[in-house]
Structures are given as structure tokens and as C-alpha cells.
Amino acid sequence: MSSDPEEDYVSWIQTFCESFGHDYFVPVSQDFIEDDFNLTGLSSQVPYYREALYTILDYEVETSEDQPNSVSGAVNSVATTTATTGAASTSATTANATSNGFNDNSRELPNKVLLARSAELLYGLIHSRYIISKPGLTAMATKFERNEFGSCPRYYCDGMHLIPVGATDIPGHETVRLYCPCCNDIYLPSSSRYLNIDGAFFGTTFPGLLVKMFPEIENQCRIRTQRFNSQDFGIKLFGFKINELSSSGPRMKWLRLYPSTEAEKEEYENCELGLPDEFEDLTGSESDMEVGEEEEEEEEEEEEGEDDDRTMASEN
């Protein structure tokens, strides 16, 4: 029995997501890619954008390896059509065609290596936009629930699942990192095979949006923080806490501080809503005092200037 060609067909997106080290990616739907609104601004960031897009959508793309003799054939055709105008015009036309037109066409056709890199870059940027949409968040939440991104190494986080994140949305600056919503720290992937993934393929918005979209993640973090005192979070050596003044001491402990007393909660709410009225009155009075002091200094300088003028007049 001969196998069905449609069953043996594997799309470019599926091949990319199943490749070694691409476990963090989810397949982007073809409808999302074909919507031009979702691709706004990407043409200026990806070389050979049109060819890369056709590659992702499994269209046949012509590369420079497919036409090795295209330049010579085009030059010969131009020389044949202009032969009747004389030898001088023929050579000039051939030279212009070679220098201006056909070399540009050969440069417009990418080779297979450049086309593959451009397609991966374009898919990664599309992926960063897809995972902040509703179907993309659902697909990534499934991976998060299965713990496919790894667990937090901190003991008091109790195996909290990690979320991939990028330090910037601009490609080529930083590789992917893993964010823990419990301790609010960022970690490197445990395996080196993920260190070649660009962080811009996940972006800076995705972790916060995933936590807000699925409140059960916040509930899991709240259970862990209530189980252990926030002061217990920190690096320890043989059971002893490391001094904060040491070179290896904790530096980001303030990220894990939560308001515990009523006074701290009230202060937190005031900071969220804005400065209190009493503080604004104090700052206003302080500014008035500063203005008054400046005016007094200006008056003293003017009086000193008048005294100097009088002294000079008396000497004359």
C-alpha cells in the first residue's frame, strides 16, 4: 500500500517547533500569519521579508541556487535584441544591463541559508505577538501547566512553574530567560540548548499578561507566600543566611516584600493612587520657602552692588 502524500506532509511551522531546542515555541495558526494587521512593522526588521513569509506558509520560494545562470542568459538576450544598433551600442547596453539590472536581481534572490535564518527570525517575531493573543495565551498556558518550561530552583517557591520572558522586544540583544511569578526573579534555562533562543521571540509583555489572564497562577503564588514568611526567602549557606553586605548577598529582596500590617497596606494604597494631600501641602510650603529664600538672596546681592557703586563714586 502506498502512503497518502497528505499524511506524510509536514508543515514548516511544525518542523520548526519540533526542532531541537524549540520546545518553548507553540505553533502559530496560519490565519494569524495571513492577517496583515498582525505583521505590521515586521517587514523593516526582517531581510527578505516576502520570501521568508512565503517559506513559513509553505509556498515555493525561488533561491539563488535555483538560477545559477540567470545573469548570463539575460545579458545574452539583451545583446541579441540590440545587435542591429551597432557594435558600440550593443556593448554599452550589455554593460549597463550587467552593472545595473541583473546583478541587482541576483542580489534580490537569497540563498537557502539566508532564507532559513530570515524565516526563523520572522516566525519568532510573529510568535511574540501570537502568544499575547487569546489562542496564544491558551496554548502557552497549557505548556505552563505541564511544566514544560521548568521549575523555580528556590526551595520556598516549592517547584513553581517558570514562564519564558525576554529582556527586550528588539531581536539580537538578549537570549530567553525564565521568570518565576512567585519570587519575581529571572533565571537562565537549565539546559544550554535554549541559550540560542532570542528573548524577543517571547517579549517582555507575555509573563505579566499570562499571570493576569489566569488568576489561578496568582493563587498558587499567594499560597506559597502565605505558607512561608517573606523574610525566609533568601540565599543560605549550610542553613545560615548570607549577610546582605557581602559580595554574594541578596540584592533584589525588595521584590518579594508584601504589605503585612494595616499601616503598610495603607501606605501601599497611597503610593498606588498618588501622593497624599498632606504631603503635597508640605511640598508646596517647602517650595514657597525656597522661593522666599531665593528672593532674599537676590535682594542682598543688589544691596551689595549698590554699596560697591557708592564706594567707587566716593573714591573718584
Image (cartoon, rainbow, N blue to C red):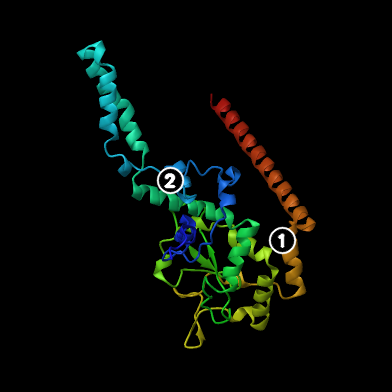
Q: Would you name the residue on which mark 2 appears?
A: 60
Q: Give x and y (percent) for residue 17.
A: 48, 62
Q: Verify CB contact (< 8 Å) between mark 1 and mark 2.
A: no
Q: Residue at x 28, y 16 (%)?
A: 82
Q: Is residue 90 visible?
A: yes
Label 2's element?
Answer: loop
**How many other residues sit within 10 Å of disc 1, few (<14), some (14-19) or many (≥20)?**
few
Residue 298, which numbered label? none
The amino acid beneath tag 1 is Cys
Query: For residue 85, what is the image quadrant?
Result: top left
Name the foreground residue: 295 vs 240.
240
Residue 271, which numbered label? 1
- Distance from Cα at disc 1 to Cα at disc 2: 57 Å
Q: Give x and y (percent) for residue 68.
A: 27, 39
Q: Give x and y (percent) for residue 219.
A: 69, 74
Q: Nearer the N terminus, badge 1 or badge 2?
A: 2
Q: Quadrant of the N terminus?
A: bottom left
Q: Nearer the viewer, mark 1 or mark 2?
A: 2
Query: For residue 266, what is the image quadrant?
Result: bottom right
As drawn, 185 above or below 124: below
Give the side of residue 174 with respect to residue 138, left or right. Answer: left
Name the foreground residue: 90 vs 180.
90
Label 1's element?
Answer: helix
Name the foreground residue: 143 vs 300.
143
As drawn, 153 above or below 255: below
